[in-house]
Amino acid sequence: MPKKLFVIGVGPGSPSYLTDVAKYAITKSRYVIGYKYTLTIIKDVIDKNKQQVSEITMQNQETIYNDVYNKMAHNDYCTVPFTGDVNFSESEVVDRLLEIFGDDNVEIIPGISSIQIAAAKSKVPLDKACVITFHVSGDIEGKKMELIDAVVNGKSVILLPRPWPKDPKKNFMQSDIAIFLRKKGVDTSSIKVCVFEHLTQDGKETVFKGKISNLEGKYFDPLSVMVIDQVKRQTYLQLVS
Ligand SMILES: C[S@@+](CC[C@H](N)C(=O)[O-])C[C@H]1O[C@@H](n2cnc3c(N)ncnc32)[C@H](O)[C@@H]1O
């Protein structure tokens, strides 16, 4: 049997959002590879006598994925946990893992995204929102156009900003977004916004509610989700004749 990989979603902050399927994947694995943040979320599920845990950084992840893959015996399972839902804003790494292990040997187990938690807290349904991640390494100009289109057309937007600590020119955080929208002619003083930091992290969670214009000059943690709320509520009473 080939070497198998579980790619699982955990958190986005609290272990209470861990699914039983994700826990099962961890317990079945001989190896677990993850960033410090995700390893902390699953620490109570890991049995150090059964799982060999490797903590990775952006700098050493390529080496560690390959080292573990080469060390694995046939029949071995490895788990790589990702924050929130592994199917959202994680593809740069997931695509590499699919290359290393081969599609047929990888099982992707979804988790609960920070986007879903923000939708729940702001009461902006996902199906009435444009969902955008700016948390990508590549060019974001197309995504900025998508943002403008959605806002101008009265849609709500749930988005992940782009923190880039090593090169602040590449930041596209809440203040940058507010300035960008104003400069594109949007009346940012009339549109509601929420920013959620540290979602589901006990004692650390914060929420800011105001208008988009209030975000200019304001700092938010990289671990944050922004919701532009233009929802018009419509119940079945208005729709059924
Ligand atoms: C690489 S993306 C991963 C998104 C993740 N897959 C998800 O479904 O939430 C990382 C970004 O997700 C957002 N994020 C992840 N966990 C969060 C949390 N607990 N609270 C607020 N934002 C979070 C932040 O914007 C963070 O910079």
Image (spheres, grey):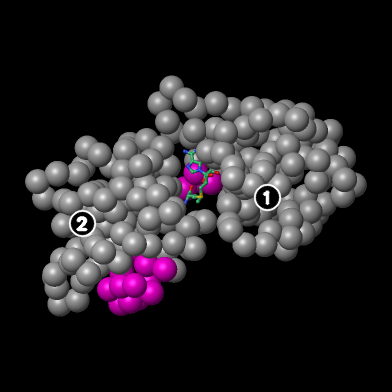
Towards the viewer: 124 or 52: 52
Q: Which mark is residue 47?
A: none
Q: Residues within 10 Å of mark 1 (few under 14, many from 20)?
A: some
The secondary element bearing badge 2 is classed as strand
Residue occupying image coordinates x 38% and y 55%: 60
Picture quadrant where residue 137 is located? bottom right
Placement of 206 over or under 150, stated as above or below: above
Under mark 2, the amino acid is: Tyr
Quarter of the figure that contains the N terminus: bottom left
Q: Is residue 231 magenta?
A: no
| Disc 2: which residue | 31
How many marks the image carries: the answer is 2
Left or right: residue 173 compared with residue 51? right
Q: Which mark is residue 170?
A: 1
- Which span of residues is magenta-colored? 96-116
2 vs 1, front mark: 1
Picture quadrant where residue 182 is located? top right
Considering only order in the chain, which callout, 1 or 2, is on the residue closer to the N terminus? 2
Under mark 1, the amino acid is: Lys
Left or right: residue 7 compared with residue 205? left
Towards the viewer: 38 or 130: 38
Residue 166 in the image: state x and y as whole percent: 59, 45
